[in-house]
Image (cartoon, rainbow, N blue to C red):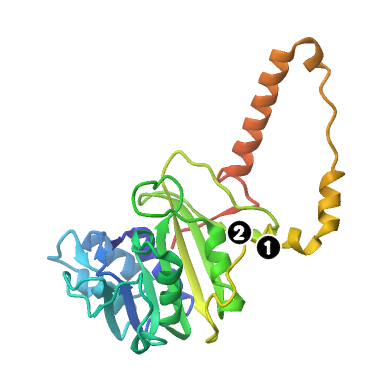
């Protein structure tokens, strides 16, 4: 578990947009996987204290100095074990103890939740540890991480979980290719664009998520539902009738005389369509944004 340059820049952007770090809780003790000289330059560029990274640092440090440089009052960590000196020892597969509810201004997941089997409860625990006005930030697995942990995640999951019904608002979601040089893309809410936000990629992708707790409300009192199914259920019989009467395109004439060629062309057409709609080039789903 650790913060790379993408997570660092995401935190800096949030801080510049007014996020108050206050009391920070990280899930697991977070490594800082950015060289000190780079950290010094990035912090100085944005006007944050950088003395902690000025010289003599190791290649990998724990991330507490970064949070302090960004204005955190206190930085704590929570883990299932105290093997790295976590302040709070608690298994996120288990319900949250009362003393941890509404205690923190920032809960940061830097690569922990995909390793927790009871993910819905672990996410609920993170949400309930926040004070009103506090933020949840996650840097987590999207595509091509099969086998890394128990799970890899979709944008839909976080948009539906961090909803007004649960007392939250999604502030920002970015997707990027793994590594320090890839472009950032703002991710559209599937419910807002009335379309699934799916993506195919040749390289591993990661999500950066930032959500704010606006009020204390029962978290997951009603289970989140995927946004493209709920309208169909609401339409009821009318939606089923429309589906039964939907337009079926005529069979191409080429299929009658050259069926093999027709099938090949159809496969190529479908493949081109999938590549367009399911790639990061789809501007309806993914909008390029500059890195801080």
Residue 8 locus on image (x, y percent): 35, 65
Residue placed at 84% from the left, 57% from the top? Answer: 237
Residue 201 as seen in the image, left or right of residue 282: left
Query: Can see residue 49?
Result: no
Reading the image, the residue beneath label 2 is 188
Is the residue under label 2 in contact with that under label 1 (CB below 8 Å)?
yes
Q: Secondary structure under badge 1?
A: helix
Query: Can see residue 289?
Result: yes
Say above or below: 244 vs 133: above
Say above or below: 151 vs 45: above
In the image shown, does 68 or 238 lie closer to the viewer?
Answer: 238
Residue placed at 33% from the left, 65% from the top? Answer: 42
| Disc number for residue 192 | 1
Crowdedness of circle 1 by 10 Å Cα count: few (<14), some, many (20+)?
Answer: few
Classify the position of the N terminus by image quarter: bottom left
Residue 99 locus on image (x, y percent): 34, 89
Tell me the CA gap for discs 1 and 2: 7 Å
Residue placed at 27% from the left, 76% from the top? Answer: 77
Residue 46 as seen in the image, left or right of residue 252: left
């Amino acid at each position: 578990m650790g913060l790379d340059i993408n997570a660092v820049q995401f935190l800096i952007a949030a801080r510049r947009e007014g996020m108050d770090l206050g009391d920070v809780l990280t899930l697991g003790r977070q490594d800082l996987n950015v060289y000190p000289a780079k950290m010094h330059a990035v912090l100085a560029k944005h006007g944050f204290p950088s003395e902690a990274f000025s010289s003599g640092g190791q290649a990998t440090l724990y991330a507490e100095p970064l949070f302090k440089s960004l204005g955190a009052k206190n930085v704590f960590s929570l883990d299932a074990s105290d093997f790295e000196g976590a302040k709070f020892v608690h298994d996120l597969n288990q319900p949250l103890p009362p003393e941890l509810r509404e205690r923190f201004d920032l809960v940061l997941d830097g690569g922990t939740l995909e390793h927790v089997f009871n993910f819905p409860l672990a996410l609920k625990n993170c949400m309930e540890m926040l004070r009103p006005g506090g933020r949840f930030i996650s840097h987590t697995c999207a595509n091509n991480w099969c086998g890394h942990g128990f799970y890899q995640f979709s944008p839909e999951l976080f948009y539906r979980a961090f909803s007004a019904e649960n007392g939250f608002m999604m502030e920002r979601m970015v997707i990027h290719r793994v590594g320090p040089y890839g472009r950032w893309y703002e991710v559209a809410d599937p419910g807002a664009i009335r379309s699934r936000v799916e993506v195919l990629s040749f390289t591993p992708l990661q999500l950066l998520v930032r959500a704010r707790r606006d009020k204390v409300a029962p978290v997951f009192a009603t289970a989140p539902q995927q946004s493209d199914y709920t309208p169909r259920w609401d339409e009821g019989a009318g939606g089923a009738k429309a589906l039964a009467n939907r337009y079926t395109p005529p069979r191409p004439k080429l299929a009658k005389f050259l069926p093999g060629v027709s099938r090949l062309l159809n496969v190529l057409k479908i493949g081109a369509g999938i590549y367009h709609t399911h790639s990061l080039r789809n501007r309806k789903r993914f909008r390029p944004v500059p890195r801080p």
